[in-house]
Amino acid sequence: MSQGNVTIAPADGRLGILIPGMGAVASTFIAGVEAVKHGLGAPIGSLTQLGTIRLGKRTEGRTPLIREFVPLTPLECLSFGTWDIFEDNAFEAASRASVLEAPLLERLKAPLSAIKPMKAVFDHDYVRKIDGPNVKGGKTKMENAEALIEDIQDFKRNNQCNRLVMIWCGSTEVFHRPAPVHASIQSFEEGLGKNDPDIAPSQIYAYAALKSGVPFANGAPNLTTDVPAMVQLARQNGVPICGKDFKTGQTYMKTLLAPGFKARMLGVRGWFSTNILGNRDGEVLEDPGSFKTKEETKLSVLEQILQPDLYPQLYKDLYHAVRINYYPPRGDAKEGWDNIDIFGWLGYPMQIKIDFLCRDSILAAPLVLDLVLFLDLAQRAGLKGIQEWLSFYFKGPMTAEGLYPEHDIFIQLMKLKNTLRWMQGEDLITHLGLEYYD
Ligand SMILES: NC(=O)c1ccc[n+]([C@@H]2O[C@H](COP(=O)([O-])OP(=O)(O)OC[C@H]3O[C@@H](n4cnc5c(N)ncnc54)[C@H](O)[C@@H]3O)[C@@H](O)[C@H]2O)c1
């Protein structure tokens, strides 16, 4: 199919979704897609399934569904493959996660039970709170990478997939910074052979995906593809990548509110955010190493949106703190509190309190669906490397070197939709109306 700006290959045949980490998010996503396919639920929260896009002038009245405007793979053509350190199949994993109700899962038991996790590449030094039996035993990280590449090929063949996409839904790894081993493809490959301790499991999956020409998205705050070796490999092999850390509960709220305060030139003196969370993710985040990784993406958002350098009077002294506490009784039903101290005209103070009783995986599942469908679209459109137009979905969006990430959700949405318009050769929408002029 030839379009105004790019040629988009059709979404023919099956798309395989490969997921390292079959916990609460992945099992809620897979079960949700099966539920929608069986007419047992609606894909609420998914832009690709429910969203529309305005085209041309408002007078033209053209507002198709996004999935009819760009060629996306239909849900009926998705297959799922996973890796996990635990042997639970998707039915058992979803039951254990207790996000979706048992009667619904019972009705989906057959397709879910058929999804059994492949053996994981795991390193206890990177996720300290859990351990499981279903792991690969390669002597070197390179051997494990090669085993993953074989898994990818086997999956594609056995499931008769035309294309694949990989999305990390595994646990949050401990905080680590880019090291010399991440500087180039060559140093990374040497490091794999020498078991370099600075190579995390998530990076071995990403390497296997990119080597296989499979697009990769990072749903956790891990370093993973945020290093030159991975960005180079993605560009070299013509593969799109994006990340990181799904923007769901509290940070989603922050990126809704903060642009509003700034738009009205209201000051912010303090923003204190705290959460209680009782699922396995919460347990992993109890480890200070994993929490530090999460804290970094959560904290970066406000600074970027509020631009204290441009507006020192309003935001220079902002005190921002984020806490997460593991509290088992709540399971996946997280509660996030925010106390925001703002100030207005003549500096008079005001307060806002938010108590968001949310469901973590219910918010994350539609983002997984949109990301895999859009990444596959990006690959069929010949886009490669970092996909900034997918920043909309992330707490810590990946950007080209030297650029700052865009966190304002409304700018992110405009960028996403304009990218779709650009792909299809439609005019970009600037919201500039000159009707008052003539
Ligand atoms: N739910 C949300 O709203 C949300 C938002 C942003 C980010 N995230 C991130 O998404 C990820 C998944 O969240 P979750 O709630 O499903 O967590 P979870 O703990 O339920 O699931 C993670 C799974 O990953 C597995 N795992 C860990 N290391 C692995 C490896 N090396 N290979 C294969 N499997 C591995 C674990 O065994 C577990 O089953 C976490 O990193 C979380 O921080 C979630």
Image (spheres, grey):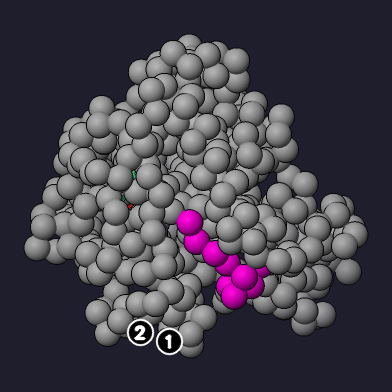
Residue 40 shows which numbered tag?
A: 1
Residue 382: give x, y in percent of width and height. 77, 47
Whether pointer 1 and pointer 2 mark residues with C-beta atoms closer than 8 Å, the reply is yes
Q: Is residue 307 above or below residue 50?
A: above
Rendered image quadrant of residue 299: top left
Q: CA distance from mark 1 to mark 2?
A: 9 Å
Q: Which residue corresponds to the image point at 42% horizontal and 36% vertical from the top-left?
A: 202
Is the shortest distance between ligand 1 and the CB of mark 2 under 8 Å? no
Image coordinates for residue 424, horizontal then vertical, percent: 82, 61
Given the image, on which type of amino acid does mark 2 rest?
Arg
Q: Which contiguous range is marked in magenta?
A: 73-81
- The residue nearer to you, when weighing 310 against 206, is 206
Q: Secondary structure at mark 1?
A: loop
Residue 391: numbered disc: none
Q: Which residue is mark 2?
A: 107
Residue drawn at (48%, 56%), measured in percent from left and top?
81
Q: Mark 1: which amino acid?
A: Leu
Q: Quadrant of the C terminus?
A: bottom right
Q: Is residue 312 above or below residue 348?
A: above
